[in-house]
Amino acid sequence: MVIKLKRLHKNAKIPTYATDGSACLDLYCTKDISFALGEVKFIDSGWIFEIPYDYYVTIHPRSGLACKQQLILLNSTAIIDSDYRGPIKTYFKNIGNNTILLKKGDRYAQMALHQRIYTQFEEVDTLTNTVRSSGGFGSTGR
């Protein structure tokens, strides 16, 4: 699958897989950026994507930044639709106790391409019963 990219920033680095088995591609900072305690800022990838029709991209936090530095992606998973043609930006918040500095070229998030499954709904009077039925949070004993 090919995603066309338009460069918006001279330091923008094309997303890459870290290993052959990586599910997601890394996104890279285009400039140094610091986050004071509690601060929320956008990080701009430096790209506009042309995502193929019937596909979408999800952007996820990097576990190392969240776990080690407490830098979190505020909407948990960002979704980029195929018809969006604006800059790929995500917003983060420092929930840790220290200022966090990301440097130009640092990996800050990861993205995955997914195929859209077009969904329709049908209203019915009854649904198929299951063993679990309506058991919710904690109902499986885990």
Image (tube, helix red, strand yellow):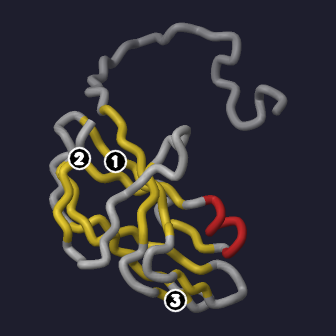
Q: Which residue is rendered at x = 52% and y = 89% of the image?
A: 34
Judge the density around disc 1: few (<14), some (14-19), many (≥20) Cα neighbours within 10 Å: many
Q: Where 78 sits versus 126, above or below?
A: below
Q: Nearer the viewer, residue 24 or 61?
A: 24
Between label 1 and label 2, give the one nearer the viewer. Answer: 2
Between label 2 and label 3, give the one nearer the viewer. Answer: 2
Q: Quadrant of residue 119?
A: top left
Amino acid bearing label 2: Ile
Q: Which residue is rendered at x = 15% and y = 49% of the image?
A: 83
Q: Which residue is rendered at x = 40% and y = 49% of the image?
A: 58
Q: Quadrant of residue 136?
A: top right
Amino acid bearing label 1: Val
Q: Nearer the viewer, residue 65 or 92?
A: 65
Contact (CB < 8 A) between labels 1 and 2?
Answer: yes
Residue 2 in the figure: left or right of residue 70 = left
Chain-order first, disc 3 or disc 1: 3
Which residue is labeled 1 in the image? 57
Chain-order first, disc 2 or disc 3: 2
Q: Nearer the viewer, residue 21 or 24?
A: 21
Contact (CB < 8 A) between labels 2 and 3?
Answer: no
Amino acid bearing label 3: Ser
In three-dimensional space, the C-alpha distance between marks 1 and 2, rounded to whole angstroms, equals: 10 Å
Q: Quadrant of the N terminus?
A: top left
Q: Which residue is rendered at x = 39% and y = 84% of the image?
A: 31
In three-dimensional space, the C-alpha distance between marks 2 and 3, rounded to whole angstroms, equals: 30 Å
Q: Which mark is on residue 34?
A: 3
Secondary structure found at label 3: strand
Q: Where 16 sits versus 38, above or below?
A: above
Q: Which mark is on residue 3?
A: 2
Chain-order first, disc 1 or disc 2: 2
In the rendered image, residue 14, in percent from the top left (x then y), is placed at 32, 60
User: Residue farthest to the front?
Assistant: 20
